[in-house]
Image (cartoon, rainbow, N blue to C red):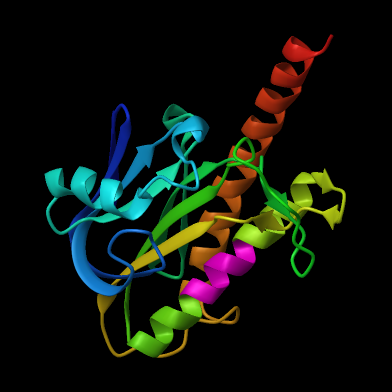
Amino acid sequence: MISVRLERPWLIADLAQEMRILSWAPFGPGLRQAARVVWREVRNADLTESFDVDGWFAAEMARFPGAVGMMTSRDIGTFTMAEARVEGVRAHCVATVGLTNGETVGRRRVWGPRDFGTINILVATDAGLTEAGQLEALSIAVQARTAAVIEAGVEAPTGRVSGTGTDCLALACREGAERYAGLHTPVGEAVGAAVRRAVSAGADDWKAWYAAETARVAP
């Protein structure tokens, strides 16, 4: 359902067809028809308060007409993928996972220019959903992301990390008549399983990287 190409600094996810995508991506947010979602790797040092990130990213995205765009400071090559099938419904997830600016929901921290790190997720399902059904499916994807991050056991001064300050999720589906996509439904189970597996694998990879990086710079 999703084919992925790594062309640094881009990760390009092509859908099998044009689909309706719901997201809060920095480029192309909201509801839109698209056949491609792309990630742009950036450096923490580039994202200063005075830098026009939106203008710069819009110019960068000109090379991918019609695509939805996300950004990450995580090594773009560390993406993870997972797939789930439930009662004939399929879901496929691609994720990049960084937890450097991890947050505990409801208790935000002060962050600085060295603290960028994010979770960016694209999940696609072959289920045909109404807009309401797609919104519910996106809520399941968010729940799965949160569960996987909490299970990763990363601690912040405010408590157990449940996400980051800059997470972004996009859910793609076909337009259809199915209005329910909650935890009791096949599509809800498939979306949740694919996202949870991909984020869990990405979080494990990030923890290993962070431990090695911390040891490397220790006095």
* Residue situated in front as seen by the camera: 218 or 154: 218
Q: Which residues are magenta?
A: 138-144
Q: How many marks?
A: 0
| Residue 132 horizontal/vertical position (percent) | 40, 89
| Residue positioned 41% across, 67% down in the render | 24
| Magenta stretch: dominant secondary structure | helix
- Please say whether residue 142 is one of the residues in the magenta stretch: yes
- Please say whether residue 118 is one of the residues in the magenta stretch: no
| Residue 172 horizontal/vertical position (percent) | 33, 66
Q: Is residue 152 left or right of residue 93?
A: right
Above or below — where is 46 with respect to 136? above
Residue 163 falls in which quadrant of the image?
bottom right
| Residue positioned 46% across, 54% down in the render | 121
Q: The C terminus is located in which quarter? A: top right
Q: Is residue 2 left or right of residue 98?
A: left
| Residue 12 horizontal/vertical position (percent) | 27, 41
* Residue situated in front as seen by the camera: 170 or 134: 170
Q: Is residue 135 left or right of residue 130?
A: right
Q: Is residue 77 left or right of residue 162?
A: left
| Residue 189 horizontal/vertical position (percent) | 55, 69
Residue at far front of view: 50
* Residue situated in front as seen by the camera: 158 or 22: 158
Above or below — where is 114 with respect to 190? above
